[in-house]
Amino acid sequence: MSNLTDKEKKKSIAIAVLTVSDTRDKETDKSGGTIIRMAEEAGHHIADYRICTDDPAEISGNVEEWIGNSVVEAVIITGGSGIGFRDVTIETVTSYFTKTIDGFGELFRFLSYTKDVGSKALLSRATAGSIDEQVLFALPGSSKAVTLAMEKLILPELHHIVHELTKHRK
């Protein structure tokens, strides 16, 4: 049972979206588009949306800009989370975490495993964590993976996570 008020449950969360890809642009970015569409349909608003290459400095630059922005409450990154040589998102973003939300990655891999991905789910390094009063989710680049994470984990818990990270201010 949630201890959120009705007002807190209806509050629109400001989300920054980053697609990490060496090949996608805003017209071909299905995963970033899926995050934006699902977040807006849930009543949230997109504070910023960008695409950058699989480069630690570019990823860090975007994350640092957003974590320094008091308007942004959540950051959702898609792409660069695999085990390939150019997949550097996880190493880059976890260094910023104040606290890791271990259950996110565990549940995401479990859900992926049971949703026809099977044992390939072990390759997922999807993760989430808090950065002071903000939450960051790092998802695979697949639009199916993004839909699964948004539908089953992020959107159902986003208000609660933001509440937990900011309730000390009340």
Image (cartoon, rainbow, N blue to C red):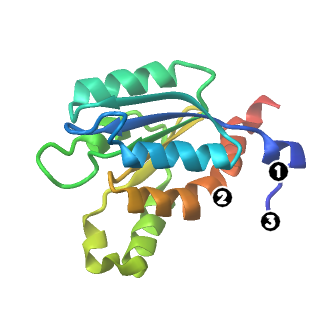
Mark found first going from the N terminus, 3 or 2 = 3
Horizontal and vertical percent for residue 36?
Answer: 53, 42
Question: In the shown orientation, is residue 123 left or right of residue 99?
Answer: left
Q: Are marks 3 and 1 in contact (CB under 8 Å)?
A: no
The residue tagged 1 is 4
C-alpha separation, residue under disc 1 versus residue under disc 2: 13 Å
Q: Amino acid at mark 1?
A: Leu
Secondary element under disc 2, as helix, strand or loop, is: helix
116 relative to 112, above or below: below
Residue 126 numbered tag: none
Q: Nearer the viewer, residue 39 or 118?
A: 39
The residue tagged 2 is 156
Question: In the shown orientation, is residue 21 left or right of residue 29?
Answer: left
Query: Mark 1 packing: few (<14 Cα in 10 Å), some, or many (20+)?
Result: few
Secondary element under disc 1, as helix, strand or loop, is: loop
Secondary element under disc 3, as helix, strand or loop, is: loop
The residue tagged 3 is 1
Residue found 72% across the figure and 38% down from its top: 12
